[in-house]
Image (cartoon, rainbow, N blue to C red):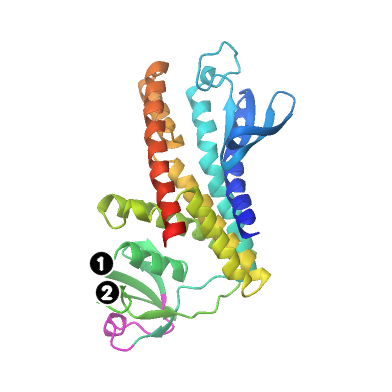
């Protein structure tokens, strides 16, 4: 059951991404030949007015197949016959819809469970926070110029900037204070700590607070995703730490099973939280300026806007082909890691 739920979550995120492309294509007057969920052999399809809506065997992807997207076409409604601005909007719509999905789900999650404020609940004796003069009840609003809106922001910043000196702004009553805290390495925890704990219990707010916190929740997830990519390039994490579809499905299934041990409500909230993470993560990854990804195509369109001249289709095709081959090689590597972790860990 948990793997069925995991596959449905993964497929839903892909569906929303591709629906972004589909909706933008229709609004821009582009013919969509097929809207497909999944990859591999087609299981079944339903013909709409001009689009085939199909479901394929492998639930690890999807596509919005537009007329003239990867080949020449004389159809005036072909993708490549549209202006560069319209092509840009169509390609950008996929990742944007992932962020919209993450935002909408964040509203539901925070409305149901609340959020943990950035207020310090307890100061640990002998730790840097105490030495710097921080106190219980202080509300952290800023760390090194990074605005803080929940305790998640504090945790994420420390995780992505291990050991870095922290210039912290706190609100103590009606007074704003600045403190400098240098994290210390804790052997038992295996990381750098400053010695603060949250108030623990989530708080709930009105509809305006919920919407605001949902926005900052998505910002937090995007920040963590980009920061993690930075650690990948600087050696902070390795390729072995990456997960592909197999690892993601296992993670969703494990989250459901863990939450179910408490209650169905907790299981649903855990799934919702992970879906927010995955949707925003997919949005960020697709915006990377790499061939075969949406970001790579957007980069080509930006260059086209600047040059006011379209790149030769053969050049664009070769770039996308090489990029796709490299992407597939990475996917095989990541999937191999997932399978190894699944059976040998």
The dominant secondary structure in magenta is loop
User: Could you say which quadrant of the image residue 182 lies in?
Assistant: bottom left
Question: Is 217 situated above or below 192?
Answer: above
**Residue 111 appears in the rendering:** no
Q: Give the range drawn in magenta.
A: 125-139
The dot on residue 164 is 1
Question: Is 314 situated above or below 14?
Answer: above
- Residue 87's spot in the image, x, y percent? 51, 27
Q: Name the residue under label 2.
A: 183
Q: Nearer the viewer, residue 219 or 275?
A: 275
- Asked whether 108 falls inside the magenta stretch, the response is no
- Asked whether 133 falls inside the magenta stretch, the response is yes
Q: Please report whichever mark, 2 or 1, sits nearer to the chain's N-terminal start.
A: 1
Residue at the image point whose x is 54% and y is 54% from the top: 249
Looking at the image, residue 298 sits to the left or right of residue 89; the answer is left
Looking at the image, residue 45 sits to the left or right of residue 242; the answer is right
Does dot 2 land on a helix, a strand or a loop? loop
């Amino acid at each position: 059951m948990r793997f069925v739920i995991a596959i449905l979550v993964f497929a839903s995120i892909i569906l929303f991404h591709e629906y972004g492309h589909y909706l933008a294509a229709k609004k821009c007057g582009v013919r969509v030949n097929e809207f497909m969920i999944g990859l591999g052999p087609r299981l079944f399809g339903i013909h709409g007015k001009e689009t085939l809506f199909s479901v394929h065997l492998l639930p690890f992807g999807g596509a919005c197949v537009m007329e003239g997207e990867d080949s020449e076409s004389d159809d005036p409604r072909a993708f490549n016959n549209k202006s560069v601005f319209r092509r840009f909007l169509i390609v950008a719509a996929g990742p944007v819809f992932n962020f919209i999905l993450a935002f909408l789900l964040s509203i539901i999650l925070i409305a149901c469970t609340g959020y943990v404020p950035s207020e310090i609940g307890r100061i640990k004796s002998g730790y840097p926070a105490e030495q710097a003069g921080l106190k219980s009840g202080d509300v952290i609003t800023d760390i090194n110029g990074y605005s803080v809106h929940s305790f998640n922001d504090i945790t994420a910043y420390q995780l992505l900037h291990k050991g870095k000196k922290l210039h912290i702004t706190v609100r103590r009553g009606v007074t704003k204070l600045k403190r400098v805290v240098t994290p210390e390495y804790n052997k038992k925890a295996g990381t750098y700590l400053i010695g603060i704990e949250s108030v623990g219990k989530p708080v709930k707010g009105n509809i305006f607070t919920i919407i605001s916190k949902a926005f900052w929740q998505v910002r937090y997830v995007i920040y963590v995703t980009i920061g993690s990519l930075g650690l990948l390039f600087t050696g902070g994490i390795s390729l072995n730490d990456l997960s592909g579809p197999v690892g993601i499905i296992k993670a969703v299934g494990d989250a459901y099973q863990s939450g179910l041990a408490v209650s169905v409500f907790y299981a649903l909230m855990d799934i919702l939280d992970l879906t927010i993470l995955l949707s925003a993560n997919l949005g960020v990854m697709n915006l990377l300026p790499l061939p075969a990804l949406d970001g790579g195509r957007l980069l080509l369109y930006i260059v086209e806007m600047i040059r006011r001249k379209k790149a030769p289709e053969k050049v664009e095709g070769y770039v996308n082909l090489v990029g796709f081959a490299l992407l597939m090689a990475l996917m095989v590597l990541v999937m191999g890691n997932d399978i190894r972790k699944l059976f040998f860990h």
